[in-house]
Image (cartoon, helix red, strand yellow):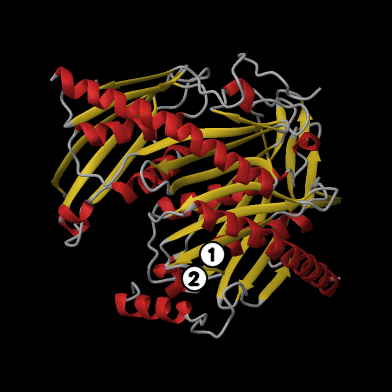
Amino acid sequence: METPNLTKKRIKDYLDVGKRFDSRELLEHRDIEIEIGVSKNAEGSARVRLGETEVIAGIKLGVGAPYPDHEEEGTMITTMELLPLSSERFEYGPPRINAIEMARVVDRGIRESGFIDFKKLCIKKGEKVWTVFVDIYSINNRGNLLDASCLAAVAALLTAKMPKYDEKLERVKYGELTSKKIPLTKVVPITLTFHKIGNNLLIDPVLEEEDASEVRLTLTLTQNDKKEVIINAAQKGNEGTFTEEELSKILDLAEKTYKKLEKEVEDKIEKSLKEKK
Amino acid sequence: MSYTKRIDGRKFDELRKTRAEIGVVPNADGSALFAFGDTIAIAAVYGPKQLHPQHLQNPEKGVLRVVYDMLSFSVTERKRPGPSRRSQEISKVTEWALVPVIQLENFQNTVIDVHISILQANASTRCAGINAAALALAHAGVPMTELVSSVSIGKVDDRIVTDLTKEEEDYKDGEGSTDIPMAFSSKTGKITLLQTDGEIRPKQMKEAIEQGKKACKEIYEIQKKVLKEFNKEK
Protein backbone atom coordinates (compact mmCIF):
# COMPACT_ATOMS: atom_id res chain seq x y z
CA MET A 1 0.00 0.00 0.00
CA GLU A 2 1.18 3.46 -0.84
CA THR A 3 1.97 5.45 2.29
CA PRO A 4 -0.89 7.88 3.12
CA ASN A 5 -0.14 11.61 2.87
CA LEU A 6 -1.04 11.94 6.52
CA THR A 7 1.75 9.55 7.49
CA LYS A 8 4.18 11.34 5.22
CA LYS A 9 3.33 14.63 6.89
CA ARG A 10 3.78 13.10 10.31
CA ILE A 11 7.16 11.71 9.29
CA LYS A 12 8.21 15.18 8.21
CA ASP A 13 6.88 16.82 11.39
CA TYR A 14 8.82 14.31 13.47
CA LEU A 15 11.99 14.83 11.47
CA ASP A 16 11.69 18.58 11.95
CA VAL A 17 12.23 18.01 15.65
CA GLY A 18 14.94 15.42 14.98
CA LYS A 19 12.88 12.28 15.57
CA ARG A 20 12.19 9.15 13.58
CA PHE A 21 9.41 6.59 14.07
CA ASP A 22 11.92 3.90 14.98
CA SER A 23 13.82 6.27 17.28
CA ARG A 24 16.96 6.27 15.16
CA GLU A 25 19.10 9.36 14.63
CA LEU A 26 18.76 10.92 11.17
CA LEU A 27 22.18 9.67 10.12
CA GLU A 28 21.99 6.33 11.86
CA HIS A 29 21.49 3.23 9.77
CA ARG A 30 19.57 0.17 10.85
CA ASP A 31 21.47 -2.90 12.01
CA ILE A 32 23.45 -4.42 9.19
CA GLU A 33 23.61 -8.20 8.94
CA ILE A 34 25.83 -9.80 6.34
CA GLU A 35 25.83 -13.51 5.71
CA ILE A 36 27.97 -14.95 2.96
CA GLY A 37 27.66 -18.24 1.10
CA VAL A 38 23.90 -18.52 1.09
CA SER A 39 23.78 -20.46 -2.17
CA LYS A 40 26.13 -23.37 -2.79
CA ASN A 41 25.96 -23.42 -6.57
CA ALA A 42 26.78 -19.77 -6.96
CA GLU A 43 30.40 -18.72 -7.42
CA GLY A 44 29.76 -16.33 -4.57
CA SER A 45 26.69 -15.18 -2.71
CA ALA A 46 25.56 -13.05 0.18
CA ARG A 47 22.49 -12.10 2.11
CA VAL A 48 22.28 -8.61 3.53
CA ARG A 49 19.76 -7.33 6.00
CA LEU A 50 19.24 -3.69 6.85
CA GLY A 51 16.76 -4.01 9.66
CA GLU A 52 13.86 -5.84 8.01
CA THR A 53 14.99 -5.11 4.48
CA GLU A 54 16.64 -8.12 2.93
CA VAL A 55 18.35 -8.81 -0.38
CA ILE A 56 20.35 -11.72 -1.76
CA ALA A 57 23.09 -11.32 -4.34
CA GLY A 58 24.68 -14.16 -6.28
CA ILE A 59 27.69 -14.20 -8.57
CA LYS A 60 27.95 -16.44 -11.63
CA LEU A 61 30.73 -16.42 -14.17
CA GLY A 62 30.39 -17.06 -17.86
CA VAL A 63 32.62 -16.74 -20.87
CA GLY A 64 31.86 -14.30 -23.63
CA ALA A 65 33.32 -11.86 -26.08
CA PRO A 66 34.91 -8.67 -24.73
CA TYR A 67 33.74 -5.21 -25.68
CA PRO A 68 35.51 -4.12 -28.87
CA ASP A 69 37.00 -1.09 -27.10
CA HIS A 70 38.26 -3.15 -24.13
CA GLU A 71 39.63 -6.26 -25.77
CA GLU A 72 41.70 -7.35 -22.80
CA GLU A 73 39.12 -6.84 -20.09
CA GLY A 74 36.41 -9.02 -18.64
CA THR A 75 32.85 -7.77 -18.51
CA MET A 76 30.16 -7.45 -15.86
CA ILE A 77 26.39 -7.56 -16.04
CA THR A 78 24.29 -6.54 -13.06
CA THR A 79 20.60 -7.31 -12.78
CA MET A 80 18.11 -6.51 -10.07
CA GLU A 81 14.90 -8.42 -9.61
CA LEU A 82 12.22 -6.93 -7.42
CA LEU A 83 10.44 -10.13 -6.53
CA PRO A 84 6.69 -9.97 -5.94
CA LEU A 85 7.41 -12.18 -2.93
CA SER A 86 9.22 -9.29 -1.28
CA SER A 87 6.48 -6.69 -1.47
CA GLU A 88 2.89 -6.32 -2.57
CA ARG A 89 4.07 -3.40 -4.67
CA PHE A 90 6.09 -5.55 -7.05
CA GLU A 91 4.66 -7.51 -9.95
CA TYR A 92 6.00 -10.15 -12.32
CA GLY A 93 7.23 -9.16 -15.74
CA PRO A 94 10.28 -7.63 -17.29
CA PRO A 95 12.23 -5.29 -14.98
CA ARG A 96 10.66 -1.87 -14.72
CA ILE A 97 12.38 1.41 -14.34
CA ASN A 98 13.08 1.28 -10.59
CA ALA A 99 14.72 -2.14 -10.88
CA ILE A 100 16.66 -1.05 -13.93
CA GLU A 101 17.83 2.12 -12.20
CA MET A 102 18.93 0.25 -9.07
CA ALA A 103 20.86 -2.32 -11.10
CA ARG A 104 22.58 0.37 -13.08
CA VAL A 105 23.51 2.41 -10.02
CA VAL A 106 24.97 -0.67 -8.30
CA ASP A 107 26.76 -1.63 -11.53
CA ARG A 108 28.23 1.83 -11.95
CA GLY A 109 29.47 1.97 -8.37
CA ILE A 110 31.27 -1.37 -8.62
CA ARG A 111 32.64 -0.68 -12.08
CA GLU A 112 33.90 2.84 -11.46
CA SER A 113 35.43 2.04 -8.10
CA GLY A 114 37.81 -0.40 -9.78
CA PHE A 115 36.76 -3.05 -7.27
CA ILE A 116 36.97 -5.83 -9.87
CA ASP A 117 40.28 -6.19 -11.68
CA PHE A 118 38.80 -6.69 -15.16
CA LYS A 119 42.22 -6.94 -16.82
CA LYS A 120 42.80 -10.23 -15.02
CA LEU A 121 39.57 -11.64 -16.40
CA CYS A 122 40.87 -11.91 -19.95
CA ILE A 123 41.20 -15.44 -21.37
CA LYS A 124 42.15 -14.67 -24.98
CA LYS A 125 42.58 -11.08 -26.06
CA GLY A 126 39.78 -9.84 -28.27
CA GLU A 127 38.01 -13.20 -28.26
CA LYS A 128 37.26 -14.68 -24.89
CA VAL A 129 36.91 -13.04 -21.52
CA TRP A 130 35.12 -13.84 -18.30
CA THR A 131 31.76 -12.19 -17.74
CA VAL A 132 30.80 -11.56 -14.14
CA PHE A 133 27.07 -11.77 -13.57
CA VAL A 134 25.92 -9.97 -10.45
CA ASP A 135 22.28 -10.90 -9.85
CA ILE A 136 20.43 -9.28 -7.00
CA TYR A 137 17.02 -10.30 -5.67
CA SER A 138 14.87 -8.49 -3.15
CA ILE A 139 13.58 -10.78 -0.41
CA ASN A 140 11.86 -8.26 1.81
CA ASN A 141 11.36 -4.61 1.00
CA ARG A 142 11.24 -2.34 4.04
CA GLY A 143 13.02 0.50 2.29
CA ASN A 144 16.51 1.29 1.03
CA LEU A 145 16.89 -1.74 -1.23
CA LEU A 146 19.53 0.15 -3.15
CA ASP A 147 22.13 0.47 -0.38
CA ALA A 148 21.42 -3.09 0.71
CA SER A 149 21.88 -4.32 -2.86
CA CYS A 150 25.27 -2.73 -3.22
CA LEU A 151 26.40 -4.20 0.10
CA ALA A 152 25.20 -7.63 -0.97
CA ALA A 153 26.89 -7.39 -4.35
CA VAL A 154 30.18 -6.37 -2.75
CA ALA A 155 30.00 -9.10 -0.10
CA ALA A 156 29.17 -11.74 -2.72
CA LEU A 157 32.04 -10.63 -4.93
CA LEU A 158 34.47 -10.63 -2.02
CA THR A 159 33.81 -14.31 -1.45
CA ALA A 160 33.37 -15.51 -5.03
CA LYS A 161 35.63 -18.21 -6.48
CA MET A 162 36.54 -18.73 -10.13
CA PRO A 163 34.92 -21.77 -11.78
CA LYS A 164 37.06 -24.34 -13.61
CA TYR A 165 37.71 -23.71 -17.28
CA ASP A 166 38.29 -26.49 -19.79
CA GLU A 167 41.04 -25.19 -22.08
CA LYS A 168 40.50 -27.89 -24.72
CA LEU A 169 36.78 -27.55 -25.05
CA GLU A 170 37.05 -23.84 -24.29
CA ARG A 171 34.11 -24.14 -21.96
CA VAL A 172 33.36 -23.46 -18.34
CA LYS A 173 33.09 -26.58 -16.19
CA TYR A 174 30.13 -25.49 -14.16
CA GLY A 175 29.72 -26.98 -10.74
CA GLU A 176 33.47 -27.15 -10.18
CA LEU A 177 35.03 -24.19 -8.49
CA THR A 178 38.75 -23.53 -8.19
CA SER A 179 40.23 -22.18 -4.98
CA LYS A 180 41.10 -19.00 -6.84
CA LYS A 181 39.16 -15.89 -5.95
CA ILE A 182 37.74 -13.45 -8.46
CA PRO A 183 40.45 -10.83 -9.06
CA LEU A 184 39.59 -7.86 -6.89
CA THR A 185 41.47 -4.77 -5.83
CA LYS A 186 41.82 -3.43 -2.32
CA VAL A 187 39.06 -0.84 -2.45
CA VAL A 188 35.67 -1.68 -1.01
CA PRO A 189 32.93 0.43 -2.52
CA ILE A 190 30.07 1.44 -0.26
CA THR A 191 26.86 2.96 -1.48
CA LEU A 192 25.16 5.57 0.65
CA THR A 193 21.86 7.18 -0.23
CA PHE A 194 20.85 10.47 1.34
CA HIS A 195 17.19 11.43 1.34
CA LYS A 196 15.68 14.87 1.77
CA ILE A 197 12.38 15.26 3.59
CA GLY A 198 11.52 18.89 4.18
CA ASN A 199 14.77 20.43 5.31
CA ASN A 200 16.09 17.21 6.79
CA LEU A 201 18.70 14.87 5.42
CA LEU A 202 18.62 11.24 6.48
CA ILE A 203 20.06 7.88 5.52
CA ASP A 204 18.71 4.34 5.38
CA PRO A 205 14.99 5.18 5.23
CA VAL A 206 12.30 2.67 6.01
CA LEU A 207 9.63 2.25 3.34
CA GLU A 208 7.39 5.02 4.64
CA GLU A 209 10.29 7.44 4.86
CA GLU A 210 11.32 6.48 1.35
CA ASP A 211 7.80 7.31 0.17
CA ALA A 212 7.96 10.65 1.94
CA SER A 213 11.36 11.45 0.44
CA GLU A 214 11.33 14.32 -2.03
CA VAL A 215 14.72 13.71 -3.53
CA ARG A 216 17.66 11.42 -2.98
CA LEU A 217 21.33 11.37 -3.77
CA THR A 218 23.13 8.06 -4.03
CA LEU A 219 26.90 8.12 -3.68
CA THR A 220 29.26 5.20 -4.15
CA LEU A 221 32.37 5.87 -2.12
CA THR A 222 35.80 4.34 -1.76
CA GLN A 223 39.09 5.29 -0.19
CA ASN A 224 42.44 5.85 -1.93
CA ASP A 225 45.90 4.93 -0.62
CA LYS A 226 46.07 8.18 1.32
CA LYS A 227 42.81 7.27 3.06
CA GLU A 228 41.03 10.08 1.26
CA VAL A 229 37.38 9.42 0.50
CA ILE A 230 36.64 9.22 -3.23
CA ILE A 231 33.27 9.48 -4.95
CA ASN A 232 33.05 6.93 -7.72
CA ALA A 233 29.43 7.27 -8.68
CA ALA A 234 26.54 9.57 -7.91
CA GLN A 235 22.92 9.61 -8.89
CA LYS A 236 20.25 12.10 -8.00
CA GLY A 237 16.86 10.44 -7.94
CA ASN A 238 13.25 11.61 -7.85
CA GLU A 239 11.54 14.80 -8.79
CA GLY A 240 12.78 17.09 -6.02
CA THR A 241 15.87 19.28 -6.10
CA PHE A 242 18.90 20.08 -3.95
CA THR A 243 20.33 23.49 -3.28
CA GLU A 244 24.06 23.90 -3.52
CA GLU A 245 24.33 24.18 0.29
CA GLU A 246 22.43 20.96 0.80
CA LEU A 247 24.67 19.19 -1.65
CA SER A 248 27.76 20.50 0.04
CA LYS A 249 26.42 19.28 3.37
CA ILE A 250 25.75 15.83 1.95
CA LEU A 251 29.30 15.60 0.63
CA ASP A 252 30.67 16.42 4.08
CA LEU A 253 28.35 13.96 5.79
CA ALA A 254 29.14 11.27 3.24
CA GLU A 255 32.83 11.44 4.05
CA LYS A 256 32.21 11.00 7.75
CA THR A 257 29.60 8.28 7.36
CA TYR A 258 31.74 6.32 4.92
CA LYS A 259 34.66 6.12 7.35
CA LYS A 260 32.41 4.72 10.02
CA LEU A 261 30.56 2.31 7.78
CA GLU A 262 33.55 0.95 5.90
CA LYS A 263 35.10 -0.54 9.01
CA GLU A 264 31.83 -2.04 10.16
CA VAL A 265 31.11 -3.67 6.81
CA GLU A 266 34.57 -5.20 6.49
CA ASP A 267 34.38 -6.58 10.02
CA LYS A 268 30.99 -8.12 9.35
CA ILE A 269 32.11 -9.81 6.14
CA GLU A 270 35.25 -11.05 7.90
CA LYS A 271 33.16 -12.43 10.73
CA SER A 272 30.75 -14.17 8.40
CA LEU A 273 33.69 -15.70 6.52
CA LYS A 274 35.05 -17.14 9.74
CA GLU A 275 31.71 -18.57 10.73
CA LYS A 276 31.47 -20.41 7.41
CA LYS A 277 34.86 -22.07 7.86
CA MET B 1 52.19 14.06 -17.79
CA SER B 2 49.24 15.87 -16.42
CA TYR B 3 46.39 17.26 -18.46
CA THR B 4 47.58 20.81 -19.00
CA LYS B 5 46.04 21.43 -22.40
CA ARG B 6 42.69 20.22 -23.67
CA ILE B 7 42.75 17.89 -26.64
CA ASP B 8 40.62 20.24 -28.73
CA GLY B 9 42.39 23.37 -27.49
CA ARG B 10 39.49 24.78 -25.48
CA LYS B 11 39.91 26.57 -22.18
CA PHE B 12 39.13 24.39 -19.17
CA ASP B 13 35.87 26.19 -18.51
CA GLU B 14 34.89 26.67 -22.12
CA LEU B 15 31.88 25.04 -23.73
CA ARG B 16 32.06 23.49 -27.16
CA LYS B 17 30.41 25.48 -29.93
CA THR B 18 26.74 25.26 -29.10
CA ARG B 19 23.84 25.39 -31.47
CA ALA B 20 20.21 25.87 -30.58
CA GLU B 21 17.17 25.95 -32.84
CA ILE B 22 13.47 26.14 -32.17
CA GLY B 23 10.71 24.44 -34.13
CA VAL B 24 12.66 21.67 -35.81
CA VAL B 25 9.67 19.30 -35.80
CA PRO B 26 6.69 21.17 -37.24
CA ASN B 27 4.21 18.46 -36.28
CA ALA B 28 4.98 18.76 -32.58
CA ASP B 29 3.44 21.25 -30.15
CA GLY B 30 6.96 22.33 -29.35
CA SER B 31 10.37 21.24 -30.55
CA ALA B 32 14.00 22.20 -30.44
CA LEU B 33 17.52 21.16 -31.30
CA PHE B 34 20.49 21.58 -29.02
CA ALA B 35 24.06 20.73 -29.88
CA PHE B 36 27.34 20.71 -27.97
CA GLY B 37 29.86 20.46 -30.83
CA ASP B 38 29.30 17.06 -32.42
CA THR B 39 26.63 16.00 -29.97
CA ILE B 40 23.24 16.81 -31.44
CA ALA B 41 19.91 16.24 -29.74
CA ILE B 42 16.41 17.05 -30.89
CA ALA B 43 13.38 17.10 -28.65
CA ALA B 44 9.69 17.21 -29.46
CA VAL B 45 6.84 17.91 -27.07
CA TYR B 46 3.30 16.65 -27.55
CA GLY B 47 0.68 17.74 -25.08
CA PRO B 48 -0.63 18.39 -22.52
CA LYS B 49 -3.12 15.86 -23.80
CA GLN B 50 -5.45 13.34 -22.25
CA LEU B 51 -3.57 10.39 -20.78
CA HIS B 52 -4.54 6.88 -21.81
CA PRO B 53 -4.95 4.31 -20.35
CA GLN B 54 -7.05 6.12 -17.82
CA HIS B 55 -5.58 4.42 -14.77
CA LEU B 56 -2.29 6.22 -15.37
CA GLN B 57 -4.00 9.58 -14.96
CA ASN B 58 -3.30 11.67 -11.89
CA PRO B 59 -6.26 13.77 -10.77
CA GLU B 60 -3.94 16.11 -8.85
CA LYS B 61 -1.46 16.99 -11.57
CA GLY B 62 -0.28 16.25 -15.04
CA VAL B 63 2.28 13.61 -15.86
CA LEU B 64 5.56 14.24 -17.65
CA ARG B 65 6.74 11.35 -19.77
CA VAL B 66 10.20 11.47 -21.32
CA VAL B 67 11.62 9.02 -23.81
CA TYR B 68 15.30 9.41 -24.67
CA ASP B 69 16.87 7.30 -27.35
CA MET B 70 19.85 7.32 -29.66
CA LEU B 71 19.49 6.72 -33.36
CA SER B 72 21.23 3.50 -34.37
CA PHE B 73 23.80 5.35 -36.48
CA SER B 74 24.48 8.16 -34.00
CA VAL B 75 27.44 6.28 -32.50
CA THR B 76 30.55 4.73 -34.05
CA GLU B 77 29.40 1.18 -33.51
CA ARG B 78 25.78 0.66 -34.49
CA LYS B 79 23.41 0.82 -31.57
CA ARG B 80 20.66 -1.76 -31.59
CA PRO B 81 17.42 0.14 -32.22
CA GLY B 82 14.83 0.28 -29.49
CA PRO B 83 15.00 1.06 -25.79
CA SER B 84 17.88 -0.24 -23.68
CA ARG B 85 18.46 -0.18 -19.95
CA ARG B 86 20.72 2.79 -20.45
CA SER B 87 18.16 4.76 -22.43
CA GLN B 88 15.40 3.97 -19.95
CA GLU B 89 17.49 5.26 -17.08
CA ILE B 90 18.42 8.42 -18.95
CA SER B 91 14.75 8.97 -19.82
CA LYS B 92 13.93 8.80 -16.12
CA VAL B 93 16.67 11.15 -14.90
CA THR B 94 15.73 13.58 -17.66
CA GLU B 95 12.16 13.48 -16.40
CA TRP B 96 13.39 14.22 -12.88
CA ALA B 97 15.55 17.04 -14.21
CA LEU B 98 12.60 18.75 -15.89
CA VAL B 99 9.64 18.10 -13.60
CA PRO B 100 10.64 20.59 -10.85
CA VAL B 101 10.11 23.59 -13.16
CA ILE B 102 6.94 22.51 -14.95
CA GLN B 103 3.64 23.65 -13.48
CA LEU B 104 2.01 20.27 -13.83
CA GLU B 105 -0.58 21.08 -11.18
CA ASN B 106 -2.50 23.04 -13.85
CA PHE B 107 -2.95 19.98 -16.02
CA GLN B 108 -4.77 17.31 -14.06
CA ASN B 109 -5.32 13.99 -15.82
CA THR B 110 -3.11 14.92 -18.76
CA VAL B 111 0.27 13.87 -20.04
CA ILE B 112 3.06 15.86 -21.60
CA ASP B 113 5.16 13.63 -23.83
CA VAL B 114 8.75 14.63 -24.47
CA HIS B 115 10.62 12.66 -27.09
CA ILE B 116 14.38 13.10 -27.30
CA SER B 117 16.45 11.68 -30.13
CA ILE B 118 20.20 11.82 -30.33
CA LEU B 119 21.18 12.34 -33.94
CA GLN B 120 24.90 12.34 -33.39
CA ALA B 121 26.80 11.48 -30.23
CA ASN B 122 30.07 12.73 -28.85
CA ALA B 123 29.55 12.66 -25.05
CA SER B 124 27.03 14.70 -22.99
CA THR B 125 24.06 13.39 -24.93
CA ARG B 126 21.77 13.48 -21.90
CA CYS B 127 22.72 17.10 -21.21
CA ALA B 128 22.08 18.13 -24.82
CA GLY B 129 18.79 16.25 -24.59
CA ILE B 130 17.73 18.11 -21.45
CA ASN B 131 18.63 21.48 -22.96
CA ALA B 132 16.68 20.65 -26.11
CA ALA B 133 13.73 19.37 -24.07
CA ALA B 134 13.61 22.53 -21.93
CA LEU B 135 13.53 24.63 -25.10
CA ALA B 136 10.88 22.43 -26.68
CA LEU B 137 8.69 22.71 -23.57
CA ALA B 138 9.02 26.49 -23.64
CA HIS B 139 8.23 26.47 -27.35
CA ALA B 140 5.13 24.39 -26.71
CA GLY B 141 4.00 27.07 -24.26
CA VAL B 142 3.97 24.69 -21.32
CA PRO B 143 3.87 26.89 -18.19
CA MET B 144 7.20 26.70 -16.38
CA THR B 145 8.48 28.58 -13.37
CA GLU B 146 11.96 28.72 -14.87
CA LEU B 147 14.14 27.01 -17.44
CA VAL B 148 16.56 24.11 -16.98
CA SER B 149 20.09 24.08 -18.35
CA SER B 150 22.41 21.13 -18.28
CA VAL B 151 26.09 20.51 -18.79
CA SER B 152 28.57 17.74 -18.26
CA ILE B 153 31.51 18.67 -16.10
CA GLY B 154 34.46 16.34 -16.23
CA LYS B 155 37.57 15.67 -14.26
CA VAL B 156 40.32 14.76 -16.68
CA ASP B 157 43.40 13.68 -14.72
CA ASP B 158 43.18 16.27 -11.93
CA ARG B 159 41.67 19.13 -13.92
CA ILE B 160 38.01 20.09 -13.79
CA VAL B 161 36.82 20.65 -17.36
CA THR B 162 33.56 21.95 -18.77
CA ASP B 163 31.60 20.01 -21.40
CA LEU B 164 33.91 17.08 -21.92
CA THR B 165 34.16 15.26 -25.23
CA LYS B 166 34.23 11.52 -25.92
CA GLU B 167 37.98 11.70 -26.30
CA GLU B 168 38.31 13.32 -22.88
CA GLU B 169 35.83 10.85 -21.42
CA ASP B 170 38.14 8.04 -22.56
CA TYR B 171 41.29 9.72 -21.15
CA LYS B 172 43.32 7.09 -19.30
CA ASP B 173 46.46 8.80 -17.93
CA GLY B 174 46.91 10.07 -14.39
CA GLU B 175 43.65 9.99 -12.47
CA GLY B 176 41.74 9.12 -15.65
CA SER B 177 38.42 10.66 -16.49
CA THR B 178 35.30 11.35 -14.44
CA ASP B 179 32.01 12.43 -15.95
CA ILE B 180 29.56 14.52 -13.90
CA PRO B 181 26.42 15.46 -15.82
CA MET B 182 24.36 18.04 -13.95
CA ALA B 183 21.46 20.42 -14.47
CA PHE B 184 20.47 23.67 -12.78
CA SER B 185 17.21 25.56 -12.79
CA SER B 186 17.81 29.01 -14.24
CA LYS B 187 16.28 31.32 -11.62
CA THR B 188 16.55 29.56 -8.28
CA GLY B 189 19.74 27.65 -9.15
CA LYS B 190 18.43 24.34 -7.88
CA ILE B 191 20.22 21.15 -8.85
CA THR B 192 17.80 18.98 -10.81
CA LEU B 193 20.22 16.43 -12.22
CA LEU B 194 23.43 15.04 -10.82
CA GLN B 195 25.23 11.88 -11.78
CA THR B 196 28.84 10.79 -11.54
CA ASP B 197 30.98 8.19 -13.24
CA GLY B 198 34.60 7.86 -12.23
CA GLU B 199 36.49 8.99 -9.15
CA ILE B 200 36.52 12.38 -7.50
CA ARG B 201 37.16 13.78 -4.02
CA PRO B 202 34.28 15.56 -2.31
CA LYS B 203 36.21 18.83 -2.39
CA GLN B 204 36.72 18.60 -6.15
CA MET B 205 33.07 17.70 -6.51
CA LYS B 206 32.19 21.05 -4.97
CA GLU B 207 34.50 22.77 -7.47
CA ALA B 208 32.89 20.84 -10.31
CA ILE B 209 29.47 22.00 -9.20
CA GLU B 210 30.61 25.63 -9.11
CA GLN B 211 32.03 25.29 -12.61
CA GLY B 212 28.85 23.56 -13.78
CA LYS B 213 26.73 26.35 -12.40
CA LYS B 214 28.74 28.88 -14.35
CA ALA B 215 28.49 26.86 -17.57
CA CYS B 216 24.74 26.41 -17.10
CA LYS B 217 24.35 30.18 -16.82
CA GLU B 218 26.00 30.50 -20.23
CA ILE B 219 23.73 27.81 -21.64
CA TYR B 220 20.72 29.56 -20.16
CA GLU B 221 21.69 32.75 -22.00
CA ILE B 222 21.93 30.76 -25.25
CA GLN B 223 18.52 29.20 -24.60
CA LYS B 224 16.97 32.55 -23.75
CA LYS B 225 18.42 34.19 -26.82
CA VAL B 226 17.15 31.58 -29.24
CA LEU B 227 13.67 31.64 -27.70
CA LYS B 228 13.50 35.44 -27.96
CA GLU B 229 14.71 35.42 -31.55
CA PHE B 230 12.18 32.79 -32.46
CA ASN B 231 9.35 34.82 -31.00
CA LYS B 232 10.50 37.91 -32.88
CA GLU B 233 10.48 36.06 -36.19
CA LYS B 234 6.94 35.02 -35.59
Q: Is residue B216 left or right of residue A8?
A: right
Mark 2 crowd level (few <14, some 14–19, many ≥20, 10 Å Cα): many
Q: Amino acid at mark 1?
A: Leu
Cβ–Cβ under 8 Å for marks 2 and 1: yes
Q: Secondary structure at mark 1?
A: helix
Mark 1 crowd level (few <14, some 14–19, many ≥20, 10 Å Cα): many
Give me the disc on residue A250: none
Position of residue A194 measured from the top left corner of the image (x, y, whole percent):
55, 62
Residue B195 visible = yes
Q: Secondary structure at mark 2?
A: loop
Residue located beneath label 2 in the image: A141
Which of the pair A140/B86 is nearer the observer? B86
Give me the disc on residue A145: 1
Identify the chain of the residue marked 1, using the numbered disc in the image: A
Above or below residue B4? Residue B68 is: below
Which of the pair A251/A64 is nearer the observer? A251
Position of residue B155 measured from the top left corner of the image (x, y, whole percent):
65, 34
Q: Residue at x 72, y 29 (%)?
A: A128
Task: Quadrant for the N terminus of chain A, please.
Answer: bottom left
Task: Quadrant for the C terminus of chain A, please.
Answer: bottom right
Q: Residue at x 28, y 45 (%)?
A: B65
Q: Is residue B98 left or right of residue A253?
A: left
